[in-house]
Image (cartoon, rainbow, N blue to C red):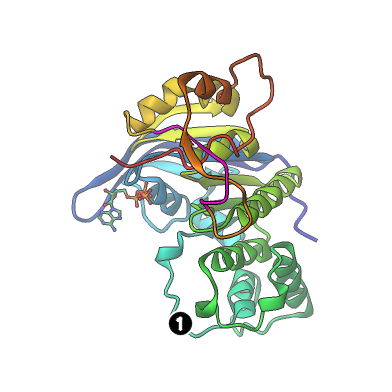
């Protein structure tokens, strides 16, 4: 069983500014607040500071001003209590390091072990359950470096699950994964939301945002807009966020993916685009098949 988190978890980012040692201010005056039982998308162009924001929440970079708190605890205290789990971008990991898949997932348990790091029965059970949840049990004795990009992502997700944190930070979990895996991850995140977790996920797959995220933070070095997806994830706000670098794409046919996914890329007309964004009297969020990877860097 996962922890039994309740909706009382609160992440409060209050007016933080992060300046790197080289003098570059990556994010400034950034504030937003999220509660448990939420999946929030963090959306912005490359270099807009999304990873920096994650690292601030993880205490890996220190804001020069402002505070990050979890249930009124400082990041340091929240980390000690294993409240936050982080799935970094794949590029940030040294994949040549010789380590088994199950060992990577066991790392999620380290914060709960004594300094000798001898896994208990419970630790092993949690690792097995986490691997099961991301459908990676069969590969648990493989070297991590031998896995595909999508499989590595799932292993890191399993590591975060094994940690049993109430807050899950995911930095681009869909990059380089096939559509089936993306859908499986989305289903898992929805289940975690139901269990009361607070999930913040950065993604460039704009099409899937309305399908599984109830909140959004549109970001470019500071918060441009934040709130419920339905009212905030609007074409106008997205144009502000992406400054004309946005392309509206739909997918169909078999050319886009290696698997049997029957989709290809085509450009949407203005009318279709309006329909995708809740137009045409649609009450429900559009299915992410309609609009996918709509960001193209200019
Ligand atoms: N360690 C660092 N030292 C100096 N500058 C950095 C450092 N890390 C990131 N930056 C700069 O801060 C800015 C924000 O980078 P960050 O990685 O947070 O963006 P991002 O939104 O996650 O980008 P992407 O979508 O490409 O992953 C960039 O201009 C980047 O060059």
Quadrant in the rendering for residue 162: bottom right
Q: Observer-nearest residue: 99 or 152?
A: 152
Q: Is residue 147 above or below residue 214?
A: below
Number of numbered discs visible in the structure rendering: 1
Q: Position of residue 198 (x, y in %)?
A: 63, 44
Is residue 141 toward the left or the right of residue 67 in the image? right
Magenta-drawn stretch, dominant element (helix, strand or loop): loop
For the record, the magenta segment spans 247-256
Is residue 261 toward the left or the right of residue 149 in the image? right
Q: Is residue 281 above or below residue 48?
A: above
Q: Is residue 82 above or below residue 253?
A: below
Q: Position of residue 273 (x, y in %)?
A: 50, 24
User: Is residue 65 rendered magenta in the image?
Assistant: no
| Mark 1 Cβ and ligand 1 under 8 Å apart | no
**Is residue 12 in sight in this rendering?**
no
Q: Is residue 172 above or below residue 194?
A: below
Image quadrant for the N terminus? Answer: bottom right
Residue lying farthest to the left in this orientation: 22
How crowded pointer 1 is (Cα within 10 Å; few <14, some 14-19, many 20+) is rated as few
Image quadrant for the C terminus? Answer: top left
Quadrant in the rendering for residue 111: bottom right
Q: Determine the secondary structure under disc 1.
A: loop
Q: Observer-nearest residue: 103 or 233?
A: 233
The residue positioned 71% from the left and 76% from the top of the image is: 138
The residue positioned 19% from the left and 50% from the top of the image is: 23
The residue positioned 58% from the left and 27% from the top of the image is: 228
The residue positioned 45% from the left and 76% from the top of the image is: 95
Q: Position of residue 213 (x, y in %)?
A: 61, 37
Which residue matches tag 1? 97
**Is residue 269 in sight in this rendering?**
yes
């Amino acid at each position: 069983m996962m922890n039994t988190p309740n909706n009382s978890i609160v992440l409060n980012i209050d007016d933080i500014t992060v300046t790197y040692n080289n003098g570059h201010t990556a994010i400034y005056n950034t504030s937003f607040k999220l509660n448990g039982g939420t999946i929030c998308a963090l959306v912005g162009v490359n270099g807009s500071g999304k990873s920096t924001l994650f690292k601030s929440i993880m205490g890996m970079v220190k804001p020069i001003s402002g505070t990050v708190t979890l249930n009124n605890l400082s990041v340091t205290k929240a980390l000690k209590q294993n409240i936050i789990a982080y799935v970094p971008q794949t590029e940030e990991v040294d994949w040549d390091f010789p380590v088994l898949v199950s060992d990577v997932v066991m790392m999620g348990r380290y914060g709960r072990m004594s300094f000798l790091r001898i896994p208990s029965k419970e630790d092993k059970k949690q690792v097995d359950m986490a691997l099961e949840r991301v459908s990676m049990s069969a590969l648990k004795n493989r070297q991590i470096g031998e896995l595909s990009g999508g499989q590595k992502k799932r292993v890191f997700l399993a590591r975060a699950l094994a940690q049993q944190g109430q807050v899950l930070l995911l930095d681009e979990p869909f990059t380089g994964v096939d559509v089936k895996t993306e859908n499986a991850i989305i289903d898992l995140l929805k289940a975690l939301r139901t269990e009361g977790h607070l999930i913040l996920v950065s993604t460039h797959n704009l099409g899937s945002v309305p399908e599984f995220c109830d909140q959004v933070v549109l970001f470019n070095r500071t918060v441009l807009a934040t709130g419920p997806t339905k009212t905030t994830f609007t074409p106008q706000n997205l144009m502000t966020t992406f400054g004309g670098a946005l392309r509206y794409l739909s997918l169909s046919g078999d050319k886009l993916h290696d698997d049997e996914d029957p989709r290809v890329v085509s450009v949407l007309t203005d009318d279709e685009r309006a329909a995708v964004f809740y137009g045409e009297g649609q009450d429900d969020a559009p299915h992410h098949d309609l609009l996918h990877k709509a960001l193209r860097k200019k």
